[in-house]
Amino acid sequence: MATERKALFLFFGGTGDLAYRKLYPSLFNLYQKGNLRSHFAVIGTSRQAMDDDKFRAAVRKSLADSGNRADSKEVSDFSSHFYYQAHDVTNTAHYSVLKEAAEKLDKKYKLEGNRIFYLSMAPQFFGTIAQDLKSQGLMSTNKDAFNRLVIEKPFGRDYDSAKQLNDALSKSFDEEQIFRIDHYLGKEMIQNIEALRFGNTLVESLWNNRYIDNIQVTLSEKLGVEERASYYDNSGALRDMVQNHIMQIVSLLAMEQPVAFTDTDIRAEKVKALRSLRVYNVADAATNFVRGQYGSINDQPDYRHEDNVPEDSTTETFVAGKLLFDNYRWSGTPFYVRTGKMLADKFTRVDVVFKRPLVDIFAFPQSQNTPLAANVLTIFVEPHAGFSLQLNAKTNDAGFSTEPIKLDYLVDAEKSKETPEPYERLLHDVLKGDGTNFSSWPEVSYAWKFVDQIRRVWDLQEPQFPNYTPHSMGPAAAEELIQRDHREWIYRLNN
């Protein structure tokens, strides 16, 4: 049985694309499941003028556009909890109007002072909003109530700006009240990493540098920058994907087993793992990370000729790199990562490549047998969720030769329909006050310190762009990066 939660949501940027596509449908899913029922309310804010009825109509449309087929009464009852307030986040006087509305709704829906402030807008306003929420009295003073601040990425564009932002937020909110959201941490198979590792002795006993040769993380996007060009050109793949999504996945793969399955213990182990991540010097950064920018093919323009992209842009649309951890568990075992736009397909996967046997007894001199293939455990994150384990087995011919076979488990279509969307999971966690699947400030800071060094090295060099063909798996340098270590990417085109 679902536990009903009581809270007032204040969405800053409440008429934005993210709110309509993800946040409101996710809230409705929680409403249908009973996590939200009678005791919740939503205030959406933005600069534009709008009344409650128009806002509620937009919310109902967002549910319809998301494919939800709930009956009209349920949708109507849900949307009746939504209210709109035109708001300029830089105008201190506007917060008094917002405070009055919040207090009125708190009494109407018996919310007991619980408040969630969701900032889904330009990051330069985060510090201002947090400061005014406290100074203008919007934060609940009820000692039994909670105040929680949800922050969308990007959380800074380097370590210095991230620290400045964190310092500003910390003046109004404690660390345990700040939820830095990363939707990748809401994905089913990302959360399954912990279950796979710590729920299976077979796996965890082999999860170290004695048995694992390397680990590969691939986040591949099939489309280009599209309407995000203006934002993307000021960010690039390194900041947009590596610093947050990839580093969070890597930390879950590299962490030690926590003392208990609590947000505090899990975050502590992720931080310890990231502390041991080797921050490269200039020479190693140049050697161990490569970048790319897609060219043109047929009717598809190259990146520099996309709308709103400067024709001399040096922004990377692809990154591949090698990460090394200087600790007992992972010393000598590289983590290879890659991500990019306009690649062969859209998918996210983790490939754990185990070491081959020290002695291949089947490769005797007169044998025609090929060398034993490596055992590979693959975690499929999207578009399909599941696992695959590659083992060696005997072929069914008259001789004695071996071949790799795969043991596969994929979540079936019915289970997939029942799987909560990432934002639904994460909003539910915010309601519970569970920070397990959110980035703590120490995690963010260590990730930025690592990424900043790569960025500094790249800024010293003029890249030779474009350097990869759309619908490939990136530039040749990404292949050379891993081949230099006498390894290869497990996912390859046509394999």
Image (cartoon, rainbow, N blue to C red):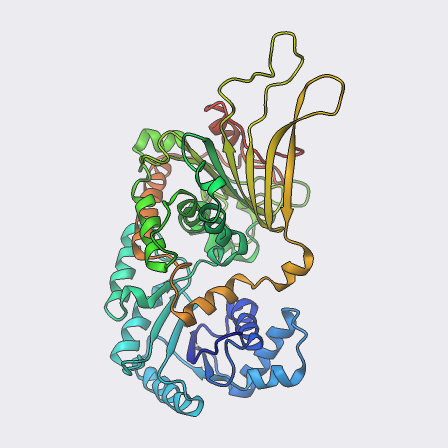
Residue 308: image location, x then y, percent: 52, 54
* Quarter of image, res 275: top left
* Quarter of image, res 491: top right
Nearer-the-camera pick, 275 or 129: 275
Residue 72: image location, x then y, percent: 66, 83
Question: In the picture shown, does residue 3 fall above or below 160?
Answer: below
Left or right: 47 with respect to 410? left
Q: Residue furthest right?
A: 398
Left or right: 126 with respect to 356? left
Numbered label tally: 0
Residue 282: image location, x then y, percent: 31, 32
Residue at 40% from the left image edge and 42% from the top image edge: 254
Residue 181: image location, x then y, percent: 42, 61
* Quarter of image, res 148: bottom left
Q: Residue furthest top?
A: 366
Nearer-the-camera pick, 183 or 162: 183
Question: In the picture shown, does residue 262 fall above or below 285?
Answer: below
Left or right: 482 with respect to 296? left
Nearer-the-camera pick, 272 or 116: 272
Residue at 33% from the left image edge and 72% from the top image edge: 129
Question: In the picture shown, does residue 223 fall above or below 489?
Answer: below
Quadrant of the rendering where the C terminus is positioned? top right
